[in-house]
Image: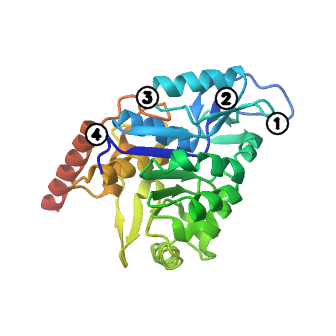
Amino acid sequence: MNPTTETVACIGGIVLDRKARVPGGARPGTSNPVSVTTATGGVASNIARNLAHLGCRVSLFSILGDDDSGSTVLRDLENSGVDATAIMRSRHHPTASYTAVLEPTGELFIGLADMDIFEDLDSAWADRMAQRLAECSVWVVDTNLPGRTIERLLLTHKGRASVLADPISIVKSERIRSSLAAVDVLFPNRKEAAVLTGLPAETPEEIAKAAAELRRVGVGTVVVTLGGDGVYLHSAGHGRLLRAIPAKKVLDVTGAGDALVAGYAYAMLAGSEHDPALFGLAAASLTVETEDSVAPDLTPTRILERIRSATAARQAHESIS
């Protein structure tokens, strides 16, 4: 596969992200002065924009409200190089939004999500999109979609496509449980892996068992994301830990997981000599160095440079020790 000729379908959420920072600390029951920033977000949307930065042809399958927010987001996506022609507009629901009220430390005080619009992406919608999706060799699916829609897409319309799936949250991960056997690469975090398997997934031994269980039920490759600890990769009957690639300076971890999935998908398409998970870790490393959820200067060259510098630093450390 060639990332410049094959089309990647990103299927799932587009969200208007609002970050409300409370300089003096949030106080319940009263008015709080805040500074608010807005940006295009959503897992499928972020992955699509990352892939476009990496030179991939990418089409986004989702829904926006027929409102000013939706129009703003649509322009942002088109300016990023994403094919947005498969995005529906709804007159019944506003564009999905997520408002994060943040403490001065950057920690979340409360998150407010308005995502009812995604219920319109039902099984009938999946059937209507099937012909266009059949033109895409790789699908990236997030669980903002209803469970029945995920089932319809993966169990009826997948065909020969390779499917990468992000469970995105503890609650929403349940939506993909019945379709796991159709997933080629799954990216759960520890808690999502625990929900999907019914097994604890905190210690290295527990994470390995949970990953093996996900493989047993039919997932091709399991990439358990471990935040600053890297990822645990289980495929072809064995598992291994890949350490995180250090960032030069961490400004915001938002979007790191989306960059990891995009980097993995790109390397898989490109037939890179590097492990796709390593490519994803390097993309995540570059992303946390910016306050944007999608690093505007993410390129294959920068990712390869980050991999080489991290490899050289590790080899130097090992030779000293």
Q: Indicate which disc, 3 or 4, sits on the residue closer to the N terminus.
A: 3
Q: Indicate which disc, 4 or 2, sits on the residue closer to the N terminus.
A: 2
| Left or right position of 146 against 280 | right
User: Which residue does the image show at 69% across and 59% down from the upper left?
Assistant: 147
Q: Indicate which disc, 4 or 1, sits on the residue closer to the N terminus.
A: 1
Inspect this view and state whether residue 144 appears: no
Per the model, the C-alpha gap separating discs 4 and 1 is 45 Å
Per the model, the C-alpha gap separating discs 4 and 2 is 33 Å
Residue 205 placed where, x, y %? 46, 77
Per the model, the C-alpha gap separating discs 3 and 1 is 42 Å
Q: Disc 3 marks which residue? A: 81
Are circles 3 and 4 on residues that touch, CB within 8 Å? no
Tag 2: amino acid: Ala
Per the model, the C-alpha gap separating discs 2 and 3 is 28 Å
Tag 1: amino acid: Pro
Query: Which of the pair 140/133 is nearer the observer?
Result: 133
Q: Disc 1 marks which residue? A: 28
Residue 115 placed where, x, y %? 73, 41
| Left or right position of 136 against 169 | left
Tag 3: amino acid: Gly
Q: Disc 2 marks which residue? A: 20
**On screen, residue 238 above or below 274:** below
Q: Disc 4 marks which residue? A: 300
The disc placed on residue 129 is none
Are circles 3 and 1 on residues that touch, CB within 8 Å? no
Helix, strand or loop at mark 3: loop
Residue 297 placed where, x, y %? 35, 29
| Left or right position of 253 against 150 | left
Q: Indicate which disc, 2 or 3, sits on the residue closer to the N terminus.
A: 2
Tell which tag, 3 or 4, sits nearer the viewer: 3
